[in-house]
Amino acid sequence: MPTETSQEMEAARAACVADIRQLCVEFQQAIAALASDDLPALEAGIENQDQLASKLQDWFRAQQANTQSQVKINRADLRELINLTSVYSSLLTRSIRTVRLRTALCRTYQQQFPATLTQPETVPSLSCEV
């Protein structure tokens, strides 16, 4: 029969694996949001990613501090996260380049027009009101 300590360690490991899987889901949703230019979904996803990453960092720090209860995580559980992180990083890098290109194009386009646009003069018109 497992001891209380091993049950706690298994529960901690299961929670960590669940957070890792949820982070994978958040990455996939962020990739879809980037692909569809859905800024609100991307911003919400980034906030969720930050929270999950903080939880995982705290969990790993606690593991390092407590050498008696080292919980091992299966490499297969981490493989998807590693692959998605790579894809997500590449996509963000390309998105940044795209945004810079769009910004440069807008600046070039704006330089073709005078800084102050004059409003067209209003021409008096006749109107019939009943």
Image (cartoon, rainbow, N blue to C red):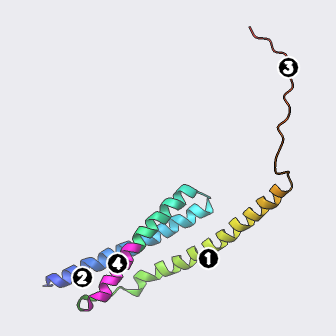
Task: Count numbered badges in the picture.
Answer: 4
Residue 90, which numbered label?
Answer: 1
Q: Which amino acid does label 3 sit on?
A: Ser
Residue 68 in the image: x percent, y percent? 23, 91
Residue 123 in the image: x percent, y percent? 87, 25
Front label number (3 vs 1): 3
- Please report whichever mark, 3 or 4, sits nearer to the chain's N-terminal start: 4
- Please report whichever mark, 3 or 1, sits nearer to the chain's N-terminal start: 1
The residue segment tinted magenta is 54-67
Front label number (4 vs 1): 4
11 left or right of 55 in image: left
* Label 2 crowd bin: few (<14), some (14–19), many (20+), radius 10 Å: some
- Please report whichever mark, 4 or 2, sits nearer to the chain's N-terminal start: 2
Disc 1 secondary structure class: helix
Q: What residue type is labelled 1?
A: Ser
* Label 1 crowd bin: few (<14), some (14–19), many (20+), radius 10 Å: few
- Please report whichever mark, 4 or 1, sits nearer to the chain's N-terminal start: 4
For the residues bearing labels 3 and 1, Cβ distance under 8 angstroms? no
Instruction: Give 130 or 17, whichever is nearer the viewer.
Output: 130
Q: Name the residue under label 4.
A: 58
Residue 110 on the magenta span: no
For the residues bearing labels 4 and 2, Cβ distance under 8 angstroms? no
Task: Give the distance between the C-alpha atoms of the residues marked 3 and 2, in whole angstroms.
Answer: 83 Å
Task: Give the distance between the C-alpha atoms of the residues marked 3 and 4, in whole angstroms.
Answer: 71 Å
Q: Name the residue under label 3.
A: 125
- Please report whichever mark, 2 or 1, sits nearer to the chain's N-terminal start: 2
Disc 3 secondary structure class: loop
Residue 9, which numbered label?
Answer: 2
Taken as a whole, is the magenta stretch helix, strand or loop?
A: helix
Residue 113, which numbered label?
Answer: none
Q: What residue type is labelled 2?
A: Met
